[in-house]
Image (cartoon, grey):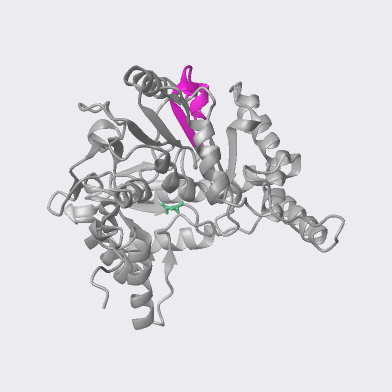
Amino acid sequence: MRIDMVKVNENYQKLPGSYLFSTIARKVNAYSEANPDKKMIRLGIGDVTQPLAPAIIEAMHKAVDEMACAETFHGYAPDLGYEFLRSAIVKNDYLARNCDIAVDEIFVSDGAKSDSGNIQEIFAKNNRIAVCDPVYPVYVDSNVMAGRTGTYDAVSETWSDVIYMPCTMENDFVPEFPRETPDLIYLCLPNNPTGTTITKDALQGWVDYANRCKAVIIYDAAYEAYISEKEVAHSIYECEGARTCAIELKSFSKNAGFTGVRLGYAVVPKDLKCGDVSLNAMWARRHGTKFNGAPYIVQRAGEAVYSEEGKAQLKEQVAYYMRNAAVIKNGLTEAGYTVFGGVNAPYIWLKTPEGMTSWAFFDYLLERANVVGTPGAGFGPSGEGYFRLTAFGAYENTIAALERIRKLGL
Ligand code: MLT
């Protein structure tokens, strides 16, 4: 008989509960099954509802047809992405904004969720991470899985080795430089979940800080397309010195509706080094080993995002969602709620009424209005007392949800 058993990665055992959006989906499904007559309106997970833009669909159809002929068929994609897509990204997302980024600094992936979970692998286990609180749970959970976060305190709902940067209405949701020096700093701007952001000048402060303390910023710019204010940077590389301290992650999910199609990219500048070691070379090694490239059809769809028709159609799609954001923001404000976000991001962050906890308000909305949102506490302890609604629903449903919430009274 074997005495030693195979051992699991014990770090996984430390994770409290399940992934936030899985927990919510389970709760909502249980409620729906018990109440089949109720028409639920889902403004919880930030999943898009509008169909893919015609220019994207056309590019996908064309790519599908190519796959049907031996002469134009495509097998494995290049590890780091097709040149046609990487060039379109560089031209439109960087050169057009005077950001100095080259094609061999772009790594095409299946989305920013994977990249934001995987990127920590190229850093040593004893690095200290700093995260905003509240925060997109993937940043923390993926570091827990890697054994980088120490022990969990169930009372404070924090990890001993994570540096938390509270973002609340008291500091206008602007993170302050932490007292302890971090090695890796996760910033998501415009922010998920609070829907708020910081100015380019404030971001420059973070770049200077990171360069000073030789930290690396993991900059998640998934919501960049929703920026409406001039003083907000669309890329961290608009800031001077970002090439030596920042990795940027981008998604096609929110700007182009690819949540079910899956496409994203990471930018790792060649100037970004830890001592003599190039992070660009490390990420290329990791990507080449563990990833076989996003599908050809999907990369052609990504290329269409940057065509003239694609850009025009997606501008309309973003405007559609931002009209929802205005409906939610204005409707809640008129109903007496304290509301944030929704100007440079498709998320509205509200103070729960009458001192309710985030989860109590979640249940209240679910049961009394049949509206699904996301409890702020699910994003971290400083999210307690807040609640997130997404602008990614259909316009009619968004209007109906607001009607229902207003009818509840405060
Ligand atoms: C969210 O709701 O926070 C996002 O949809 C999650 C994601 O993009 O993975």
Residue placed furthest toward the left? 155
One can see residue 8 in this view: yes
Residue 369 screen position, x and y as percent: 34, 67
Q: Quadrant of the C terminus?
A: bottom left
Residue 262 screen position, x and y as percent: 58, 54
Tell me what residue is drawn at x 29 percent, y 51 percent.
376
Is 66 in front, or is 92? 66
Residue 223 inside the magenta-drawn segment = no
Specify whether 261 is left or right of 391: right
One can see residue 410 in this view: no
Specify whether 364 is left or right of 79: left
Classify 127 as above or below 56: above
Tell me what residue is drawn at x 12 percent, y 53 percent.
155
Kindly indicate the quadrant of the structure image that contains residue 52: bottom right
Classify 285 as above or below 205: below
Q: How many numbered circles are shown?
A: 0
Kindly indicate the quadrant of the structure image that contains residue 368: bottom left
Is 343 in front, or is 46? 46
Specify whether 178 is left or right of 103: left
Q: Which residues are magenta?
A: 227-248
Q: Quadrant of the N terminus?
A: bottom left
Residue 209 screen position, x and y as percent: 34, 20
Tell me what residue is drawn at x 27 percent, y 74 percent.
2
Specify whether 8 is left or right of 81: left
Is 284 in front, or is 35? 284
